[in-house]
Amino acid sequence: MNSYRQPGLVLTDRHFTVPLDHADPGGEQIEVFGREIVAASRAGQELPWLLYLEGGPGFGARRFTGAEAWLGRAVREFRVLLLDQRGTGLSTPANRQTLPLRGGPREQADYLAHFRSDSIVRDCELIRPQLTGGAPWTVLGQSFGGFCAVRYLSAAPEGLSTVLITGGLPSLDAHADGVYRAAYPRIERKVAAHYARYPQDVERAREITAHLAEHRPESAGHRLTPEGFQSLGILLGGGSGSHQLHYLLENAFVRTPHGTELSDTFQEAMRTATSFAGHPLYALMHEAIYGQGGRPTAWAAERVREEFPQFDAATALKGDGPVLFTGESIHPWHFEVDPALRPLRETAELLAARTDWEPLYDPERLAANEVPVAAAVYHDDMYVDTAHALRTAATIRGLRTWVTDEFEHDGLRAGGPRVLDRLLAVVRDEV
């Protein structure tokens, strides 16, 4: 363990060894990293633990600087563990550089099959007694972290004292097809709202799309395509995302001796926003987190998109309609344009074809739940369908919701201590 200080905090880096396959506890082991954070004034006290599970999949826990955002509220009463879920951050990272150590694509896909919420929860249950002495802890799950929390309630509720979920109540039984069939209309509403706010972006987006379709430039090995440009719509799911997208578009073109070209500023911004170099598991596992019922996910977002022809950029350019941005979806072309994903294309194909995914949630156990649970449900969340979330909320006994349109999906980040304060008040029946 390595302990050090930031203003007002004591941080301790912790490393844990867990089985790759929890069904074979004596087999191969991997490392999971967590960062313990406690208020400096309370470092020597016995405090309840709060485990934070980051959104994703595929993102390591946020690296805070001091007691910022919701962390400042949490350390007033908790000792916090920021967990890098397996394969992310410092937890035996899985990416194009490390996965070849497993062997070829088949071996890589078999390895990654152990990186869903069921394995993450079992990691947590091995880690918990090492920190708490066996006492249950509070879990705060953001987005995919909330999916993990619902799995935790299904599989090991004895490890939980309280569960807090922000923008992360999954459908218990929806196939990936149903998830994306509900997603595209939500995305279209967000795009319409963006264009209503910034009508000048309609023509600018058409011009950019047409230029990319004709020239197909590259930035640091990343191929910039119309589909990649459309995927910038992922920004629209955050509270300030529409403004970020607008500012990105306004720098698109510059005049040069060779005519008008896409600016280096725009190309670098687009590459940065669409690259998966820092979180390749997001692309590899994004549809797998919905895999249940013996059916392959089979590139669900790509297949379902065909049911919504208004999202086809070429069709939009032939007419006079707007180019629609897309959102949180992964497509086969991601593994062609992104150098961080290109070597993993066959691995992704094997994961998409996989049919042996185990069920993740236990409706009967959730219906008998005794753990206090509060969930923030964002009124028109672009990433997690509100109707699906509320349906799940109604099936978990005792779960209390806070439905709000004050925040978008990133409410925990944007709202900081207010969001955590509200959830704690809700779960404690103080509001």
Image (cartoon, helix red, strand yellow):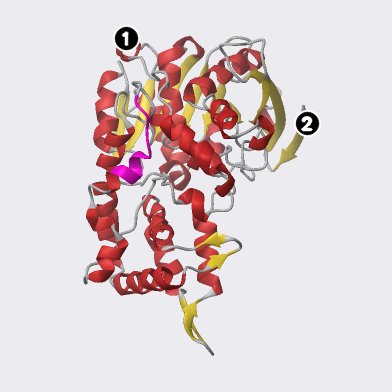
Q: Residue at x 62, y 12 (%)?
A: 129
Residue 171 - label: none
Q: Which quarter of the rendered picture does the C terminus lie within?
A: top left
Q: Is residue 167 left or right of residue 270?
A: left
Q: Residue furthest bottom?
A: 257
Is 300 a magenta residue? yes
Q: Residue 292 in the image: state x and y as whole percent.
A: 36, 23
Query: In percent of the image, x 33 and y 21: which residue is there?
Result: 293
319 vs 153: above or below:
below
Residue drawn at 56 percent across, 15 percent down? 125
| Residue 314 found in image quarter | bottom left
Callout 2 secondary element: strand
Q: Determine which residue is flagged by label 2.
A: 2
243 to 188, vertically: above or below: below
The amino acid beneath tag 1 is Ala
Q: Is residue 321 magenta?
A: no
Q: Which picture quadrant has residue 169?
A: top left
Q: Is residue 294 left or right of residue 278?
A: left
Left/right of residue 102 with respect to residue 196 in the rendered view: right
Q: Secondary structure at mark 1?
A: loop
Residue density around tag 2, few if under 14, some if 14–19, many if 20 or more, within 10 Å: few
**Rendered residue at 29%/31% (across/down):** 389
The disc at residue 368 is 1
Mark yes or no: residue 382 visible: no
**Extent of the magenta region:** 295-303
